[in-house]
Image (tube, helix red, strand yellow):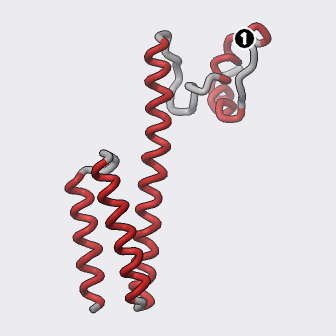
Amino acid sequence: MEESNLTGLASAMQWTRRGDLPSYVLVLQSPLFDERSETLPNIKQQEKRMRQAEKRRMRNKSRKSEIKTYIRRFEAALQRGDREESELYLAKAIKALDKAASDGILHKNNAANRKSRLTRKFNALS
């Protein structure tokens, strides 16, 4: 198999017993192999670190998406002129931004700048 076919198949494969398949298929079936990495670690601790990093990346991605959703809903409510709904989503966005900053997903200054920008938009409506 050529290299381009190997990377495309990685996400669709599952674990099987090692004795059943050749080594190139085992690499594809590893949960540590994806399109971003071409090699697997030889050290167990590094494998664990890769698994942990992937879990964190997915969790952080989800949290950032949640923040963007609240901001999008806030801005849509502002466009409609719905003060109550925009106030609700402003509070949710600020809470999510503070939580993300405290957990290290966003830098604290980035969160503060976003909160400030949203608050200024809300106050301009009044």
Report the residue that reaches farthest toward the left: 109
Residue in the image at 20% along x and 56% along y: 109
Q: How dense is the environment of label 1, judged by Cα within 10 Å: few (below 14), some, or many (20 and up)?
A: few
In the image, 30 versus 84, the foreground residue is 84
Q: Please, what is the three-letter code of the amino acid marked with disc 1?
A: Arg
The relative height of residue 106 versus residue 89 in the rendered view (above or below) is above
Report the residue that reaches farthest toward the top: 19
Q: In the drawing, does residue 110 fall left or right of residue 100?
A: left
Give the percent coordinates (x, y) of residue 24.
Answer: 67, 15
- Name the residue carrying label 1: 18
Position of the C terminus by quadrant: bottom left
Question: In the structure shown, which secondary structural element does the residue marked by tag 1 occupy?
Answer: helix
Residue in the image at 44% along x and 53% along y: 63
Q: In the drawing, does residue 101 fall left or right of residue 75?
A: left
Position of the N terminus by quadrant: top right
Give the percent coordinates (x, y) of residue 43.
Answer: 47, 10
Q: How many marks?
A: 1
Residue in the image at 25% along x and 85% along y: 123
Give the percent coordinates (x, y) of residue 104.
Answer: 30, 45
Residue in the image at 46% along x and 30% along y: 52
Report the residue that reaches farthest toward the right: 20
Give the percent coordinates (x, y) of residue 114.
Answer: 27, 65
In the image, 90 versus 1, the foreground residue is 90
Q: In the drawing, does residue 4 fall left or right of residue 58?
A: right
